[in-house]
Image: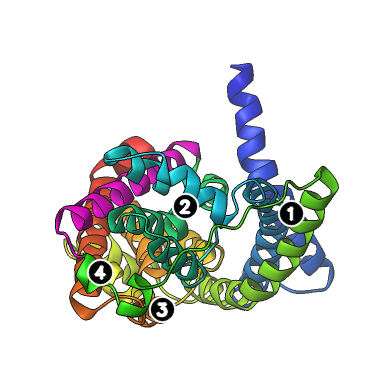
Amino acid sequence: MLMSVIWDFIQNQILGMKWLNSAVGDMLNAMGLDITGRAGGSVQFFIYDVVKITILLCCLIFMISYIQSYFPPERSKKIMGRFHGIWANIIAALLGTVTPFCSCSSIPLFIGFTSAGLPLGVTFSFLISSPMVDLGSLILLMSIFGAKVAIIYVVVGLIVAVIGGTIIEKLKMENHVEEFIRSANGVDIESPDLTKNERISYAKEQTVSTFKKVFPYILVGVGIGAVIHNWIPESWIELVLGSHNSFGVILATIIGVPMYADIFGTIPVAEALLYKGAQLGTILAFMMAVTTLSLPSMVMLRKAVKPKLLSVFIGICTVGIIMVGYMFNALQHLLV
């Protein structure tokens, strides 16, 4: 009982920051803005979510960057090189959780690993995992959907990454990597051991740099979420993304692909969709599609791989995302 009370406090007041929502509402009421109306409610949603995500974002980036300082590309390559078969895919997927926050920033590392001679399937397990299931997604999903959903999401995402990389490995598609990457010679550079202060300094720099990159997407994502939350009728969301539409997961996946954002930009949209009655699996499929298969990242990846391999990658990820979406929809009554 005590543990349940403690966890509810962590879930609602630390991760969810419900106190912040109340404080924003009180401030807006004191300014004479009716937060029960659409305009006032939108303003409250926008301020609350921007501040909440910014606080979580900065804390998470700092912690993840500090961890990441122990896994520079050279060390990651050596770690992955020690394992073979499915274990290599698992290690690559796990390493993806402590690396960059979006698919576009993961691709240069993928290219580096591939040119260094790591098996193609292993590098694709990393590429799928990195944007889809980083540690930030675990914490942020916990703040919205709860620990059960967040943990299952991460585990299933890792499974998709491992299976996807394994399939690509079995297809023997090394010849479908662009020649300039295959002919490149990986250079082993010994990473110096950093002191604690140097790691802290690195984490601070990464926090500032990453925040500058993703903050515009947070503003856009929260803005879209505010519109959905206060202006779009619940019946519309339920009609398109609710349980009565069997194709909601597929539709959400297709909609998510052309977009570009990271987990921090998609969270407020997901929060608003859940509040309006969209199914859990449909929302998660949308998030996975946006973070893993965004159009800009596919354009970047095309520079490294040939069309056939790119098509296989997109196909595997799309099928995996859709299957995950329908699985979560089927289990929603047990998870939420």
Label ID, residue 96: 2
Mark 4 vs mark 3: which is more N-terminal?
A: 3
Residue that badge 1 annotates: 20
Residue 33: name its quadrant: bottom right
In the rendered structure, does residue 168 fall within the stretch colored magenta?
yes
Residue placed most toward the observer, 128 or 194: 194
User: What percent of the width, then of the height, locates residue 104?
Assistant: 48, 73
Residue placed most toward the observer, 119 or 336: 119
Q: Can see residue 136?
A: no
Residue that badge 4 annotates: 314
Say which of marks 2 and 3 sits in front: 2
Mark 4 vs mark 1: which is more N-terminal?
A: 1
Q: What is the magenta range?
A: 147-173
The residue sitting at 64% across, 50% down in the picture is 64
Residue 314: name its quadrant: bottom left
Quarter of the image where the C terminus is located: top left
Residue placed most toward the observer, 302 or 266: 302
Mark 2 vs mark 1: which is more N-terminal?
A: 1
User: What percent of the width, then of the height, locates residue 317?
Assistant: 26, 61
Q: Can see residue 124?
A: yes
Amino acid type, callout 1: Leu
Mark 4 and mark 3: Cα distance apart in space: 15 Å
Does residue 313 appear left or right of residue 278 in this picture? left
Mark 2 and mark 1: Cα distance apart in space: 32 Å
Residue that badge 3 annotates: 259
Does residue 207 appear left or right of residue 4 in this picture? right
Mark 3 vs mark 1: which is more N-terminal?
A: 1
